[in-house]
Amino acid sequence: MTGVLAQLAGLFVVLSLLSVGGGNGVLPDMQRAAVDQYHWLTARQFLDLFAISRATPGPGALIVLLIGFKAAGVIGALVAGISMFAPSCVIVHLAARYWDRAARSAWRELAERALAPVAVGLTLGSGIALIRGTEHDWPAYAVTAGSTLLLTLTELHPMIALAAGAAVLLAVGT
């Protein structure tokens, strides 16, 4: 049990420090470690936990607590949560103290411009990793592509797109 707790702490401290733009940016690494490296979960369990973490109120990285719980119970959830949230919170706190002071400096503007595409790229990579882990037939890929286009080009409520996608997949028997 101590070994699993150390693995949880090590993984989530590193991911916390890499999670530029939020927890979505490190989902592929989280999935790879939890499923392929440590075997705490199956790919299907990871996706189920991801869905649960998105359906519940709270931070987007709530999946961390669920992975920790699955790996080592309540203590695992605590270790994973503290390891994921504490390092980045400390860094944000320290950065915020100096961010306002640097309002007109050139390095602040450069940092903002440089980090924006990094965050977008990490989030896009997360989406691709999740798609690869779940969808293995053309109807599911088609629903994902259609939903993405629909939500990008319109102001449709996501629950309507979700319901429409489920209806299409039920109709085609997937």
Image: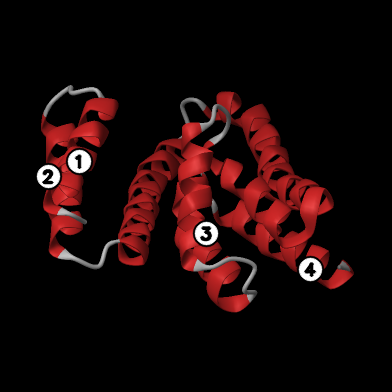
What residue is shown at x 57% (from left), y 24% (from top)? 100
Left or right of 32? Residue 79 is right
Crowd band around label 4 with a 10 angstrom C-alpha radius: few (<14), some (14–19), many (20+): some
**Disc on the earlier residue, 1 or 4:** 4
Residue situated in front as seen by the camera: 68 or 16: 68
Q: Nearer the viewer, mark 1 or mark 4?
A: 1
Give the CA separation, mark 2 to mark 1: 9 Å
82 lies above or below 93: below
Q: Nearer the viewer, mark 3 or mark 2?
A: 3
What element does badge 4 sit on?
A: helix
Labelled disc at residue 165 = 1
Mark 2 vs 1: CB contact within 8 A = yes
Labelled disc at residue 49 = none
Crowd band around label 2 with a 10 angstrom C-alpha radius: few (<14), some (14–19), many (20+): some
Mark 3 vs 2: CB contact within 8 A = no
Q: Amino acid at mark 3?
A: Gln
Q: Which residue is mark 2?
A: 146
**Disc on the earlier residue, 2 or 1:** 2
Q: Which residue is mark 3?
A: 45
Crowd band around label 1 with a 10 angstrom C-alpha radius: few (<14), some (14–19), many (20+): some
Crowd band around label 3 with a 10 angstrom C-alpha radius: few (<14), some (14–19), many (20+): some
Q: Nearer the viewer, mark 2 or mark 1?
A: 1
What element does badge 2 sit on?
A: helix
Q: Amino acid at mark 4?
A: Val
Q: Amino acid at mark 1?
A: Gly
Q: Position of residue 115 (x, y in %)?
A: 41, 47
Q: Which residue is mark 4?
A: 4
Q: Position of residue 139 (x, y in %)?
A: 14, 57
The answer to whether residue 60 is seen in the rendering is: yes
- Give the colour scheme of this rendering: secondary structure
Q: Amino acid at mark 2?
A: Gly
Residue situated in front as seen by the camera: 23 or 106: 23
